[in-house]
Amino acid sequence: MDSFLKTVDDTDVLVQAQNLNKTYYVRNGMFKKTRLCAVNNISFDIYKGETLGLVGESGCGKSTTGFMLLSLLKLTSGKVFFEGERIDNLSEKQLKQYRAKMQLIFQDPYASLDPRLRILNAVGEPLVIYHRVKNFNEKKEYVAELLKAVGLQADDMNKFPYEFSGGQRQRICIARALALQPSFIVADESVSALDVSIQAQILSLLIQIKKEQELTYLFISHDLAVIKYICDRIIVMYLGKIVEIGSKKDLFSTPLHPYTQALLESVPSIGKKNAKTILQGEVPSALNPPSGCVFHTRCPHATDRCRREEPVLHENGNQKVACWLYT
Ligand SMILES: Nc1ncnc2c1ncn2[C@@H]1O[C@H](COP(=O)(O)OP(=O)(O)OP(=O)(O)O)[C@@H](O)[C@H]1O
Ligand SMILES: [Mg+2]
């Protein structure tokens, strides 16, 4: 992937996020409403064929970012481009053609399947909505192919969701996401609810499908082991901001941002006696983010400048980092 990244140009960009912002106004006390900046001015590209990871602690804005890319959530400001076309300002009717190309695989395979729908209808629904099948038999044939592609049996189409295990249900969700032959999939914590052994099976399936169908993934997870397994490049977020972007190899071998370093240090692994707990204290509230660098309250290297001035994301070798240590 590294050599691939050195040769990419604009035509290799599938999705582009420009200065994305998402602000909520949340009730704070009886009458007061406070501004909550869920995503704060982030920009990045997703290249055709890559798996881009989005990692960070709970509440840092990962899902909000994914939902904005898919136009499932309105931007407060910023722009999203898909295959070079701006899509964040389109009407629902104009968006329909893009919706087929961009799919979401949810976190919870239990919640995302209607318990009353047989698998044939759950997986076949998008095919009907988008007129991809002419009749019932064609729908059955197509759904059978989709189920086989995700390692299930054609006969499974006659069953209901409760007849499947968690891993099998996630396979069904993947089959449904693949129905319209998308080019871009956002997988939001798609394996987090599964047992570790099942996680590995689903990750292998996602990797295999990506190769077969020339897909591009945005893979959202708070689990660095999962990110390391599946991603080519990684974005690290903290309190609504991007603090570092790099290839998997660079980021895991030479993490630049103190937050990335702390995240990697905190991953327990076999043979490592104790994961160091460099990350002290809680993530500050997004309702009242720290001044300057948002990480300064937990950073072992923080200086007066970090408390005062916000660092911008800039290139440092092959990585990008937002930290005053690298200026
Ligand atoms: N509808 C909403 N109204 C108000 N605040 C919201 C809303 N949705 C999200 N937020 C806030 O926006 C911030 C980012 O949330 P988001 O769900 O994107 O985080 P996340 O990184 O996906 O977290 P997790 O790892 O727990 O899924 C959080 O502070 C969250 O509380
Ligand atoms: Mg989330």
Image (cartoon, rainbow, N blue to C red):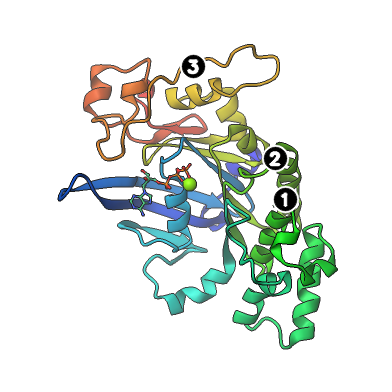
Q: Is residue 194 left or right of residue 40?
A: right
Say whether marks 2 and 1 touch (CB < 8 Å): yes
For the residues marked 1 and 3, what is the alpha-carbon distance in whole angstroms? 32 Å
Structural crowding at the residue carrying mark 1, measured as other residues with C-alpha within 10 Å and reported as few (<14), some (14–19) or many (≥20): many
Return the x and y of residue 205 as percentages of the image width and height: 75, 50
Of the numbered discs 2 and 3, the one sitting upstream in the chain is: 2
Indicate whether 299 appears above or below 246: above
For the residues marked 2 and 1, what is the alpha-carbon distance in whole angstroms? 8 Å
Of the numbered discs 1 and 3, the one sitting upstream in the chain is: 1
Return the x and y of residue 32 as percentages of the image width and height: 16, 48
For the residues marked 2 and 3, what is the alpha-carbon distance in whole angstroms? 25 Å
Q: Which residue is mark 2?
A: 195
Q: In which image quadrant can residue 58 be found?
A: top left
Indicate whether 20 appears above or below 287: below
Q: Helix, strand, or loop for circle 2?
A: loop
Residue under the point 15% across and 50% down? 31
Q: Amino acid at mark 1?
A: Gly
Number of the front mark, 1 or 3: 1
Q: Which residue is mark 3?
A: 277
Q: Is residue 276 left or right of residue 307?
A: right
Residue sitting nearer the eye, 144 or 3: 144
Q: Helix, strand, or loop for circle 3?
A: loop
Residue under the point 27% across and 35% down? 289
- Figure quadrant of the C terminus: top left
Return the x and y of residue 173 as percentages of the image width and height: 66, 60
Residue under the point 36% across and 68% down? 89
Number of the front mark, 2 or 3: 2
Q: Which residue is mark 1?
A: 167
Return the x and y of residue 124 as percentages of the image width and height: 69, 74
